[in-house]
Structure formats: structure tokens, C-alpha cells
Image (cartoon, rainbow, N blue to C red):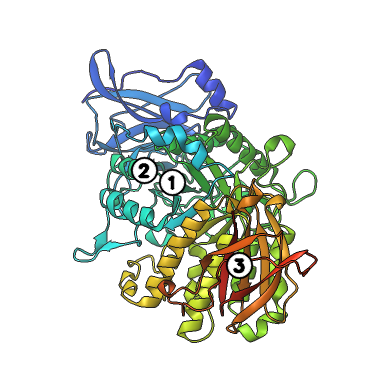
């Protein structure tokens, strides 16, 4: 049996950066790397285990015997064990057997930096490399324009395991199949970006990927790492960006994972009040430990670097920000200033965003943050957290609550809709109707709509029309775009058969057109995060449950006037003030026949009248369909 040969990829500078929490490309050093030493091909292994007194690589090449391939500990106090094993190569399966100084505990762990993992329920790591040749040069050169804050940004959120299944064989679609089917569909629907729920390796299907064990490996459920690269590549070749859900907030206690890695609390915070998540029964990273910060920031950089991701949607930011998150009095300890903020986590997020944007200025980081914590999407140099965008959870809750009400009661709750505009420009907000809104008895988005079939679908079309014309970017979870009737079930495919029915086909056509409208009308995106891009015409007509507002771009000739009627009573010849004199043309109406509307209550091109109304010098009379929205634009 070949011995372990002393070898290192680390320089003294690497070690200094690692210890100080400033090494952001640890994946180039840690893990398994196929290489040649002294003319012999094999694999170099490196793992961080400072509490270990012995670390062995065990695998299919040594019958999983501890002690046959013992790694060497570095002399510099870094806690890194490393070594080169000849004749071990691509496809070999392995783990680290760690003998701890703590009570002689032994752990057997998957490689935290593995590029490929075994298919669950198997848990070992696989030595891997690939020579994938990217073909997305055109996209990468111009993606700064696609990912800019003043560009259209409409996101389709996808759970790869349940988007569509191979029914005959009762299995997931592979990355390769998705690179055809999913890419074609997203392009047809005119979304600008896809967001994937976590694709990093995870052991437990019902976690949907939010409990990770393989931070540097795309899940083997759908194929090989290079096949996932193919999926990303195909999206880019079709001018579609890709956002990856990223989970630096917690990790599971599975025996092969990061927990209690070397017999000590290595990656997790040793204090249970900071290191254990009571809701998710999982462990919380120790954000104050420099080596852990380097691990996490390197992981963020890895997906942007090696997999050409266009952004990271950071999960459960609120749980990281607050020491008392989901904890009762006495279950948490205040910070050094007596507050509830987790100062170490805040510092980590700032550093992560600085590292990401300094290396990849043409991507976006997006925070799923549900509180009123200030300046989440503001630059770090003025005290912000440095994210590009933040999910607008308040808008989502208020809007869904409003639309669930019978229209007759809506006049008493107009403030539920208008309230969002009081804080809409405090952050760069993304409006999300995500997977979290269609599970655990909440019903589908369509299922929340009141009334008979016609009203439910009209309400849904109105909700989407309001959403796409509200300031901010947009996110829709799979199935919402065609009015999925049932709650999302991660174990089965979406109900694609519904598209044989006109109401569902109509919702799908509406989303296609709303995406096109959003992409084609600068007023909807050029100032989507600025108060200069929005103006109320009237938010006081609660008796009729009508909202009228203006969306503005850089050029006033692109201004749009939007009117929404939240009741099933048509508003014919509804008088409203307009910004200036001229001719207005209807460019969108949610009541068209192709959307399963009646096709009535359209508006012809009309000239404004010099009659003052709603504090404006000019006005027009508009037809607003029942439970409908219209968008008007000045014609030259």
C-alpha cells in the first residue's frame, strides 16, 4: 500500500490569510486535488482538524481501514492535516477518520471541500475534477447590464426535484435534461433569471436543500458537477441569469457533516445559545472564528467563480442577525453593548458582501431578511450590510392578506396595499411570492383567492399585474405562473396537466406578457429602487377600491399610468388625473380573452382633457375591468 507523501499546496501567506479570516479561495487548497508529485499521479488531501491527534484518509482504495493513510499535521499551529496519496484518482470514494484529543472521540467525516459527493443516502466524498469548457463568454462579458440594479430583474424560483419529473420512470429530471427543458421554458416565459433552491449536496429530501452537508458539491441527485455547469451554461447562452440559494445560517447534525467535526465544536459556535437553532434542530456557524469566516466566504466565491453563478440569495438572514431569534428570555445572551444584534454575524455578512462585490462586481447578493433591520441593501462604507437587494416580506404578507379578502370588504383595508409605499425605497426590494408561501397549509397562491372560478382567476391576474407594476424586482415560485391549484409538494411534479384548461393557460399567457412588459418598458425598471420612479395619482378611493399610480423612468416620455380595480364591479369612464396633456394608449389589460378575461372594458387611444382632477391639470376617463388592471402610456 502506497504511503502518504509529504506535500502541501499551502504557502505561508495562505496560512496567514486563513488564520486571519481573509482567505477567500480555500477551495483551491483544501479538499482533494488530483496532482502529480515526483512523477507519480495521485491525490493531495487537506483538512482542517485542530483538535485531532490523528487524521486518516479512508476509502475504497484502502478497504476503509483507519491508519493506512495518515495525513501529516502542519507545524504552524494552523490545525491543517495534509498529504499526497499516490495512485488515488478521479472517482475514488473517501472520508476522513479523525481521532480527537477530546476524550479520544473518533469521527468519520465527509470532506467539507469535496467537489462531488455520493448519492444520498450514501455519505462519502468522491475525488473529482472536470475540464468543462464554458461557452458563455458572450453572457459573462455583458452580464453587468443584465444584473444591474436599473435593469429588468424577473426571477423564476425553481426546486429542481419537483419542477418536472420523468413520469414513465418516476424520477427527477437530470441536469442535462433540465438544460433543455427548463431553459426552453424559462426563455418562453420571458423571465430574466432563474433562482434555484439549494443545489449544494444535502442528505434529507424534505429539507429542500436548506440543510447542507456538501457545500462545494452540486447535489448528485441530478448528475455530475460538469452537467450542472452545462445547465448554467445553457441558461447563459439563452440570456438567462442564474441565482443560487446559499445557506450560511445553519447546518445539520448528520454524523458525516460539519458538526462536531474533529471531536470539538469546530464550525459551530460552542455556546448552544449561539450555536444551536431550536426551530430547525441544526447547528449555527461560529461567525467569530476566522477560519470559519474564510470557509464560508470561500464557499460564496466558489459558486460565482467555478460555476459562473450570477448571484446568491442568502437564506434566513434574520436568524443570523439576532441573538434572540426564536429564543425565549434566558435562552440568549446580549452582545457586548447589551443589544440583541449578533455583531459577529453582522461583521461576517459585511465582509462576505465586500469580498463578493470586489471580485465579481457584476453579480447580486439578495438577502431573505424578514425584519426591519436597517440598511440591509446599503453599502458597507455607510454602515449597511452590503447586499444588492432584500426580499420585501412585508409587501408579500400585506398583499396576500388583502387579496384573500372578499372584494366587498376590501374598501376597509386599502391601507394594506398602500402601506408598502411608505417604506418601498428604504431598501432595494425584491417582491417575492416564493416557495414558503405555498406550503404547510397556506394553500397555493390561486387557492388563497376568494370567489367563484372566474373571480379567483381574475384576482390572481390582478395580483400579478399589481406586483409587476409595483416598484422593485420580482420573484415567482414555480407553478404560480400558471395558477397551480394545489399546494406545492416537493415529492411530485408540478401539475402541468392544468395547462389544458383555459383559465390556467390564461394565467401563463399573462405572466409571459407581464415579463415582456417589464423588460420593454424602462419606466418599470430604470428607477425601480428610487422614489423618483413612482408617484401616486390616487390612493384614497377606498370606496371603489381603485388605485392609480405612475411609474417613471429616466425619460418622461416613457411614463406609465397604472389603474387597478380591486372589486368585481367594472369602473367605466372612471375619471382620473394624469401627469400632463397628450394622448394615452392602453398597452396592457389583464382582462383580455387570451388571459381568460372577458375581453371587454378596453381603452382606445384618447386625448387628455384640460379638466383638473386629483390636483392635476389634465384628466381622462378610463375603463377599468372588474378585478382588473390597465397600463396606459403616452403616445408620441
Furthest-left residue in view? 168
Quadrant into which the N terminus falls: top left
Report which residue position mark 2 lands on.
Answer: 232
Instruction: Write the residue at 48% across / 46% down.
Output: 259
Instruction: Write the residue at 39% across / 51% down.
Output: 202
Work out whether 532 lies above or below 625.
above
State the SS at label 1: strand
- Mark toward the start of the polypeptide (2 vs 1): 2
Q: Which mark is residue 293?
A: none
**Label 3 – label 1 distance at C-alpha:** 42 Å
**Label 3 – label 2 distance at C-alpha:** 46 Å
- Residue 73 location, quadrant: top left
Please say whether residue 1 is visible from this viewpoint.
yes
Report which residue position mark 1 lands on.
Answer: 242
Report which residue position mark 3 lands on.
Answer: 606
Label total for image: 3
- Mark toward the start of the polypeptide (3 vs 1): 1
- Mark toward the start of the polypeptide (3 vs 2): 2
Q: Residues within 10 Å of mark 3 (few under 14, many from 20)?
A: some
Residue 190 is situated, as x and y percent measured from the top left of the image, at 42, 55
Instruction: Write the residue at 39% across / 73% down.
Output: 504
Amino acid at each position: 500500500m502506497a504511503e502518504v507523501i509529504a506535500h502541501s499546496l499551502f504557502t505561508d501567506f495562505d496560512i496567514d490569510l486563513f488564520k486571519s479570516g481573509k482567505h477567500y479561495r480555500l477551495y483551491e487548497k483544501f479538499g482533494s486535488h488530483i496532482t502529480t508529485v515526483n512523477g507519480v499521479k495521485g491525490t493531495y488531501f487537506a483538512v482542517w482538524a485542530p483538535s485531532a491527534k490523528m487524521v486518516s484518509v479512508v476509502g475504497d482504495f484502502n478497504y476503509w481501514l483507519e491508519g493506512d493513510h495518515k495525513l501529516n499535521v502542519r507545524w504552524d499551529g494552523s490545525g491543517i492535516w495534509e498529504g499526497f496519496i499516490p495512485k488515488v484518482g478521479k472517482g475514488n470514494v473517501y472520508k476522513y477518520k479523525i481521532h480527537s484529543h477530546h476524550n479520544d472521540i473518533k469521527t468519520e467525516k465527509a470532506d467539507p471541500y469535496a467537489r462531488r459527493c455520493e448519492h444520498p443516502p450514501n455519505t462519502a466524498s468522491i475525488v473529482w475534477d472536470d475540464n468543462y469548457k464554458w461557452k458563455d463568454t458572450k453572457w459573462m462579458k455583458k452580464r453587468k447590464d443584465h444584473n444591474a440594479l436599473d435593469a429588468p430583474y424577473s426571477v423564476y424560483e425553481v426546486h429542481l426535484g419537483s419542477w418536472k419529473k420523468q413520469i414513465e420512470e418516476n424520477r427527477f429530471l437530470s441536469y442535462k435534461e433540465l438544460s433543455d427543458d427548463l431553459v426552453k421554458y424559462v426563455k418562453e416565459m420571458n423571465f430574466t433569471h432563474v433562482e434555484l433552491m439549494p443545489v449544494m449536496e444535502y442528505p434529507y429530501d424534505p429539507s429542500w436543500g436548506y440543510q447542507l452537508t456538501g457545500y462545494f458539491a452540486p447535489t448528485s441527485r441530478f448528475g455530475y458537477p460538469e452537467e450542472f455547469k452545462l445547465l448554467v451554461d445553457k441558461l447563459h447562452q439563452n440570456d438567462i441569469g442564474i441565482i443560487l440559494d446559499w445557506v450560511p445560517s445553519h447546518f445539520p447534525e448528520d454524523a458525516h457533516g460539519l458538526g462536531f467535526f474533529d471531536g470539538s465544536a469546530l464550525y459551530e459556535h460552542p455556546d448552544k445559545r449561539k450555536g444551536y437553532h431550536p426551530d430547525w434542530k441544526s447547528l449555527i456557524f461560529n461567525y467569530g472564528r476566522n477560519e470559519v469566516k474564510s470557509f464560508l466566504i470561500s464557499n460564496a466565491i466558489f459558486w460565482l467563480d467555478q460555476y459562473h453563478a450570477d448571484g446568491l440569495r442568502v437564506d434566513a438572514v434574520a436568524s443570523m442577525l439576532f441573538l434572540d431569534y426564536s429564543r425565549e428570555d434566558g435562552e440568549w445572551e446580549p452582545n457586548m453593548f447589551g443589544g440583541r444584534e449578533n455583531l459577529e454575524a453582522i461583521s461576517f455578512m459585511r465582509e462576505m458582501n465586500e469580498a463578493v462585490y470586489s471580485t465579481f462586481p457584476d453579480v447580486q447578493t439578495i438577502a431573505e431578511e424578514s425584519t426591519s433591520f436597517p440598511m440591509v441593501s446599503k453599502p458597507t462604507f455607510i454602515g449597511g450590510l452590503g447586499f444588492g437587494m432584500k426580499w420585501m416580506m412585508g409587501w408579500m404578507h400585506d398583499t396576500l392578506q388583502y387579496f384573500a379578502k372578499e372584494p366587498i370588504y376590501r374598501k376597509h383595508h386599502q391601507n394594506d396595499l398602500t402601506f408598502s409605499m411608505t417604506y418601498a425605497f428604504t431598501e432595494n426590494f425584491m417582491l417575492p411570492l416564493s416557495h414558503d408561501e405555498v406550503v404547510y397549509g397556506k394553500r397555493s397562491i390561486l387557492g388563497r383567492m376568494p370567489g367563484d372560478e372566474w373571480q379567483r382567476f381574475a384576482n390572481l391576474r390582478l395580483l400579478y399585474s399589481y406586483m409587476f407594476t409595483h416598484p422593485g424586482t420580482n420573484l415567482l415560485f414555480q407553478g404560480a405562473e400558471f395558477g397551480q391549484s394545489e399546494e406545492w409538494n416537493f415529492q411530485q411534479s408540478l401539475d402541468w396537466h392544468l395547462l389544458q384548461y383555459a383559465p390556467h393557460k390564461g394565467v401563463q399567457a399573462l405572466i409571459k406578457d407581464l415579463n415582456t412588459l417589464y423588460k420593454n418598458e424602462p419606466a418599470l425598471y430604470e428607477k425601480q429602487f428610487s422614489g423618483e420612479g413612482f408617484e401616486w395619482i390616487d390612493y384614497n378611493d377606498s370606496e371603489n377600491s381603485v388605485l392609480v399610480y405612475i411609474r417613471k423612468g429616466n425619460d418622461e416620455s416613457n411614463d406609465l399610468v397604472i389603474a387597478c380595480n380591486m372589486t368585481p364591479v367594472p369602473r367605466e369612464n372612471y375619471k382620473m388625473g394624469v401627469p400632463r396633456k397628450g394622448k394615452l394608449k392602453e398597452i396592457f389589460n389583464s382582462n383580455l380573452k387570451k388571459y381568460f378575461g372577458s375581453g371587454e372594458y378596453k381603452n382606445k387611444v384618447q386625448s387628455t382633457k384640460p379638466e383638473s382632477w386629483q390636483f392635476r391639470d389634465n384628466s381622462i376617463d378610463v375603463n377599468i375591468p372588474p378585478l382588473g388592471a390597465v397600463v396606459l402610456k403616452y403616445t408620441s
